[in-house]
Image: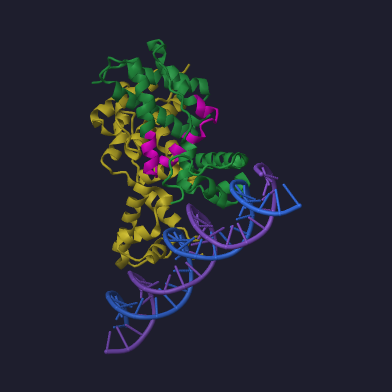
Chain colours: A yellow, B green, C blue, D purple
Amino acid sequence: MTHSDVRGPAPRFSERSAPTRQAILDAARARFASDGYDKTTVRSIAADAGVAAAMVMRYYGSKADLFAATTRAGFTALDLTQVPRHEIGERFARASLEPWERGDSAAMAALHRSAVTHPDAAAAVQRLIDTQLLPALKDAFPDDPDIEVKAGLMHSQGLGVIVGRYLLRLEPLASLDFEDLVRSVGRTLQHHLDHPMR
Amino acid sequence: MTHSDVRGPAPRFSERSAPTRQAILDAARARFASDGYDKTTVRSIAADAGVAAAMVMRYYGSKADLFAATTRAGFTALDLTQVPRHEIGERFARASLEPWERGDSAAMAALHRSAVTHPDAAAAVQRLIDTQLLPALKDAFPDDPDIEVKAGLMHSQGLGVIVGRYLLRLEPLASLDFEDLVRSVGRTLQHHLDHPMR
DNA sequence: AAGTAAGGTCAACGATCGTTAGCAAACGCC
DNA sequence: GGCGTTTGCTAACGATCGTTGACCTTACTT
């Protein structure tokens, strides 16, 4: 009850412990991203951060709260209203895949790796779709009645690339040249957008 | 060492225990499919099968061996050589998704749910691609130099639907009418096939 | 009916997990 | 310079996991 009934980061800590707290957060992000929620142990995070396991509990309350803290990351909303219609597919593909290609999406990787067995994480992915992907598309195609379904199909193509290339590292998907990949996936997304349903 | 150095199902068991062995296998398939490898406990499998946990070890040696036994399922190879070129996309989509739609792919679900955190399972998925998907496509398009890359892209589209619709149950993907889905995905696969790379 | 091999249960093992309590050292403030 | 707060560690708890071995019990063989 020391933490769960508090709103913010619970009891405020001194500035002196900031490096340690940051090291724990960084280690947690890396571990969750590469191993998923369940296989990641608090002890391994602490070891990576160079502190005792008890420190993790001290600063973040619980493993679940720490996971929540790592997934609080700024996903910059995409503005597609200024993009020419026929370029939206490729632009969308590039924006979606570039963070993964740079290895700059630890929080997202953790989320997707955990989602398959962790309903809470799956719900978080759903929330991401509803608040990021769908609004951006709705803004760009305000008069398309099938835009939600199209968004679902587009998302499935993106999800497949993410899971296959970055999480499972399946061949030949994992070795594809990035620019070729963006072009092909972009063409597919555009194809979904351009074709009416039924 | 009672089991690991034996080739077949280890020591042969009497026919009298067949119902129990089958009950354990069925329960394991269901549990692995819905929860993944790591979150599935031997005790829960035993409880579902109505026997003691020790029976699981007795008949299957270890949890890992039991998992291997559940993934030994007949995936009927697809023959696309007699299908008209322009129908291959939809035919392929239907054949890939129908078992999932019927809830008849417990072994596949277990495999995919475990693959994200279990390298062995990911390797099994890779093997599935190499032995099932690629040969079928190579037979149908023997003179396409980019067929491997195209197969990778097609697989990513299929994988995205499987993960999004059947494993994560993301909306609107999960609620889509199956025939509409097959048509759209089939069109996408066909699109991948028809377009030359670069 | 007796004897034997297989089916099955039960309790416990060692390991590992998240988490907690208690105590030593380091720092900032008066 | 002394004192209280914060940082950090060590040790342990309780739960759960896969796995094992000792022990009944059922059913088939002769």
| Percent x, y of residue A54 | 40, 66
Query: Measuring 33% from the left and 33% from the top, which residue is drawn there?
Result: A79
Foreground residue among C4 and B156: C4
| Percent x, y of residue A155 | 40, 31
Q: Can you say whether D8 is above or below D24 in the image? A: below
> What is the span of residues highlighted in magenta in the rendered image?
B98-125
Task: Tell me how many marks there are.
Answer: 0
Foreground residue among A128 and A97: A97
Task: Choose top left, top right, bottom left or bottom right for residue B124.
Answer: top left
Q: Can residue A155 be seen in this view?
A: yes
Foreground residue among C22 and C16: C16
Query: Measuring 28% from the left and 62% from the top, which residue is drawn there?
Result: A19
Membership of B102 in magenta stretch: yes
| Percent x, y of residue B115 | 40, 40
Query: Measuring 47% from the left and 42% from the top, which residue is drawn there?
Result: B67
Q: Can you say whether A144 is above or below B46 in the image? A: above
Membership of A25 in magenta stretch: no
Task: Choose top left, top right, bottom left or bottom right for residue A141.
Answer: top left
Task: Choose top left, top right, bottom left or bottom right for residue B153.
Answer: top left
Which quarter shows the C terminus of chain B?
A: top left
| Percent x, y of residue A167 | 35, 40
